[in-house]
Image (cartoon, rainbow, N blue to C red):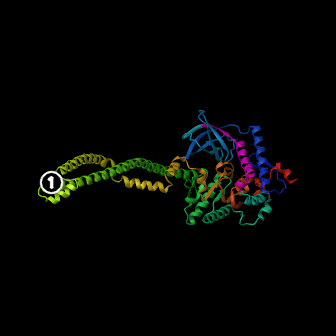
Amino acid sequence: MIMASPGVTVQVIAVVMTAHELIEAWSSCLETERIRLTEAGHDAPILASQGRLLQTIGGLHLYEFVVPSDVTLHSDLPVSVVPIDEAETTEGIVLHQTGHTILVQLVDGLGGDVPSVTLVPDRAGLLSTSASRLRDMLAKPDLFHFGPTERLASLLQMPEVDARAVPAASSVFATVWMDDRSQRRQKLASLAVELIRANKRILFLSPSHQECDEAVGQVARTIKAGGLNYRMWITRYELSVTTQAGGIYLHEVGFEAQMHQFLAKSQADKASLKGKYDRFRELAPLLAHKEAKQKDLDEVRALEWRLVTQLRELQVRIADVEATLKQFESLSLFQRLAMQALGKNAESLQQYRELYQQQMDQLDKEIDVAKGRIQQLVPEAAVPRGKRAEFDELKEYIAKLGGAKKVRELMAAEEHSSRQAFLQNRRLVATTPTRVATDPVFSQVRFDVLIIDEATRIPAHALLAAAGLIRERIIISGDPREIASAGQWAIPQVVTHIAE
């Protein structure tokens, strides 16, 4: 019997299975072990002391605790942390253990110094989540990729000798078998740089978070030596357990730090957009009111112009009448008779003059009313200096974003951008296989290439879960002599019926 992962018992059996069969076997094995752990009550509370906050990045907090000498907590084990004062419980994961000291990543802060807490490990939950991911791969094959996974499944069933015979490179599967660990890691770093230059999205896995930090430092140095900015391409998914690796400050490539910076910029951009949109909405009714008043002003001015024109015409007519009356006595008999034939005489001309004067008096009153209305409308229709240009600029800006409706949708979006979308845009994501198999964010993210550092020390079920996310190629690294001694690839005993 061989231990493939903490608490999972397997037996080496000479069977050859497809990827689907191997995934089903490991899913059943994990579920069986989960039931055993639940019934045996292995997830007993642990009293941890001397807690202290090491760092806070974004919404995550890294704490150090001291546990009893007989306690061993494996990396990526989820734990519930209950403060001594029985305050609200927070959740986290164990990142690393050195002797009696453990590093725990928490989603809620507990303060700078924590005298003691109660840790409640959830090994059964970890196994259940891993098994669920494998079952999802079987139940929803269209959402996962099984081309490279089939090649990996074949390797996972090979002994050391056969594994060494696997071709070093192909379009779908490649191995980096070297005795020297530093040479293997340097080779992986060089391959990662080549793939980044080829615009490939890479999932980089290491057995533990400490080894992941070391690998990230190696890749970052290689990228830097190649003339690229490693901060733009690499993200370390969990909080790093070491400050720097190979001269590279790991907080610069931490996913949480990058996400926090992105959110800060995003929120600043959203605040700027909100300010512009609010100003647009403030100016829109104001200028609409001004435009309505300007329209009224134009209409009144047009009316005034028509009244003035009529007044001038009447003035001309009165002047003609008065001129005629002055000359009437001196007109010849023929001219008088001609005027009388048209109904004009001294008496009728007087009547015409009175009529015209009445009309002029009425027009004067209407013109006075129009002028008063104009004086009232001029300030109401006046647009303050610069307001029109400001509004036109905001209107053009909003139109470029898709209009007011689109801007409202952007404003209504959640304050925190999707971690999945942000992760999808990173070129190289470094983490551990267990995090990939259990963190929900990875269930929807897909990669082009999978690079596995020290694969022989990683449980087969975690490798299979990660392989389903890969579209094009898998690169395996390690020492094949460790396949048997590590026992992480041993086929579960529960699948003996498949070979029959």
> In the image as oriented, which residue stretches furthest toward the right?
500
Residue 194 horizontal/vertical position (percent): 63, 66
Residue 106, given in percent of the width and then of the height, sits at 60, 43
Q: Amino acid at mark 1?
A: Leu
User: What is the secondary structure assignment of the residue under circle 1?
Assistant: helix
Pick whichever, 371 or 331, lies toward us: 331
Residue 137 percent location from the top left of the image: 73, 52
**What residue did someone put label 1 on?**
325
Apparent side of residue 26 relative to residue 188 in the rendered image (left or right): right
Q: Nearer the viewer, residue 213 or 191?
A: 191
The main secondary structure of the magenta stretch is helix
* Residue 117 on the magenta segment: yes
Magenta range is 116-144
Q: Is residue 76 above or below residue 484?
A: above
Camera-nearest residue between 310 and 475: 310
Side (left or right) of 192 relative to 34: left
Q: Nearer the viewer, residue 232 or 247?
A: 232
User: Within the image, what quadrant is residue 423 found in?
Assistant: bottom right
Please tell me in which quadrant of the rendered image residue 189 appears. bottom right
Magenta-drawn stretch contains 319: no
Q: Residue at x 22, y 46 (%)?
A: 358
User: How far across and down, in percent of the image, does residue 257 sit?
Assistant: 55, 51
Q: Is residue 253 visible?
A: yes
Total tally of numbered discs in the picture: 1
Q: Is residue 487 left or right of residue 294?
A: right
Q: Residue furthest top?
A: 85
Q: Residues within 10 Å of mark 1 (few under 14, many from 20)?
A: some
Q: Is residue 490 visible?
A: no
Give the residue drawn at x 66%, y 41%: 79
